[in-house]
Amino acid sequence: MKRVYECPKFAMSVEPAQTDAQGVQDAQGVQDAQGVQDAQGVQDAQGVQDAQGVQDDAGSWKKAQEQYQNLQPKKKPRTPKPEDALTIAVSSRALFDLDIEREIFEKEGVEKYVSYQIEHEEEPLPKGAAFPFVEALEVVNERLRELCPDSDDLFDIVLMTNNNAQIGVRLINSINHYGLNIERFCMTGGKSPIRYLKAYQTNLYLSADGSKVEEALREGIAAATMFKPSSNSQLKSTELRVAFDGDAVLFSDESEEIVKEHGLDVFFEHEKANVNNPLAQGPMKGLLEIMGRIQKKFHNQGERLECPIRTYLVTARSAASSGARTLKTLRSWGLEIDEALFLAGAPKGPLLEKIRPHIFFDDQMFHVESAKESGTIAAHVPFGIAQKYKKKKKKSAISTSES
């Protein structure tokens, strides 16, 4: 209810006190609402800024990563990206001759061995069995860089060793002394390096330690044990020559099993019956594929005769009786071999002496020994039934000596 007061000059009406309080509340509500809106606006603006900051950070990290990946030396050949490279992992004892140092390690222990290496770290190590092969791979890389300057489809050598990191200085000095382009190292301080092979995306592992080679093969990685020849041969410096045995090396050991279990006559019948059935792949098939892929780069540029890689099949098989299946298998894989030599059981050494390969892969140690005697760098592939027979003979010899 309004009260009306009249006076001579004008009349005035007044609301009760409650009305005044309500007005104060309404004004406060408006201010509060405005404050909430302002706070929300600040938060929204802050959120936009934060999101923008995250985007900016992501962009800057990506840019930095791209810049890092694109860094290339100007005075040395670039190191190919691991995902594109053809990676050959080589142990220090395969790349260099460490016989003296190994003897110190075995007779005097690890501390004396490390001390000796540090004391002699300015002295380059002598070349080992795998050295000519690595040198030849680098020659191929030089030609590839000329042919395809922007391609990373190159051979990348990784030094894979269980040596202590302190010995790394001598290894680096030796590599630089010989002018090798080896930038990736793995030094495991006494532990087996095999667990790192897949992380380095290894295509082939070469070592002087047969047990590590067997371990690598069990992991599904092509591997071989290196052996120094009895005498040094003059190898061609402008052409990489790689020789392969057939069964249990390029191919599976299925045919060799038949020879071991049933003899040659049954083997010849089996091969004739299966001449059009490709053999399963062996551990070195992937390496031949890599060699073939590189060769095609030169063939496609009209440089077949100047190609810096030449491959050989050197097999104990007979050509007429069992050779056709191997050649048809290679054809079914889409692979070429430059030269195929069928020896019908004859020794391989004399032929290898004429080929002079930078490396020869075989699963039978007596062929490896024959190669060594002819001055050939041989690599033993401990795969297939021949290894089982070898272990059986070893056990039999032990039991005979104990009885």
Image (spheres, rainbow, N blue to C red):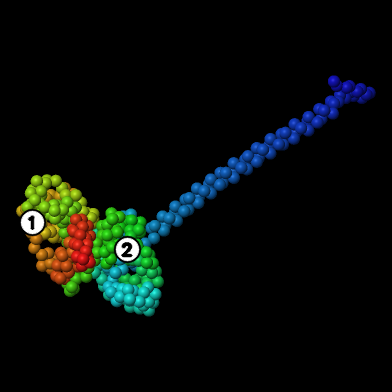
Tell me what residue is drawn at x 78 percent, y 33 percent: 24
Left or right: where does residue 176 sit relative to residue 400?
Answer: right
Quarter location, residue 176: bottom left
The outermost residue toward the left is 320
Looking at the image, which is closer to me, 304 or 332?
A: 332
Which is more N-terminal, label 1 or label 2? Answer: 2
At which x and y percent is residue 360? 18, 63
Left or right: where does residue 164 sit relative to residue 321?
Answer: right
Q: From the image, which quarter does the C terminus lie in? A: bottom left
Left or right: where does residue 26 sit relative to residue 266?
Answer: right
Query: Vertical placement of 72 versus 251: above or below?
Result: below
Query: Vertical placement of 4 versus 143: above or below?
Result: above
Give the residue pinned by disc 1: 318
At which x and y percent is residue 213? 27, 61
Question: Secondary structure under badge 2?
Answer: strand
Tell me what residue is drawn at x 17 percent, y 74 percent: 231
Q: Count neighbours of disc 1 (C-alpha within 10 A) and say few if under 14, some if 14 to 19, many if 20 or more.
A: some
Amino acid at dot 2: Val
Is label 2 in contact with label 1 (beta carbons under 8 Å)? no
Amino acid at dot 1: Ser
Q: Name the disc covering residue 67, or none.
A: none
Tell me what residue is drawn at x 39 percent, y 57 percent: 69
The outermost residue toward the right is 8
Tell me what residue is drawn at x 13 percent, y 53 percent: 261
At which x and y percent is residue 111? 39, 75
Looking at the image, which is closer to me, 21 or 122?
A: 122
Give the residue pinned by disc 2: 158
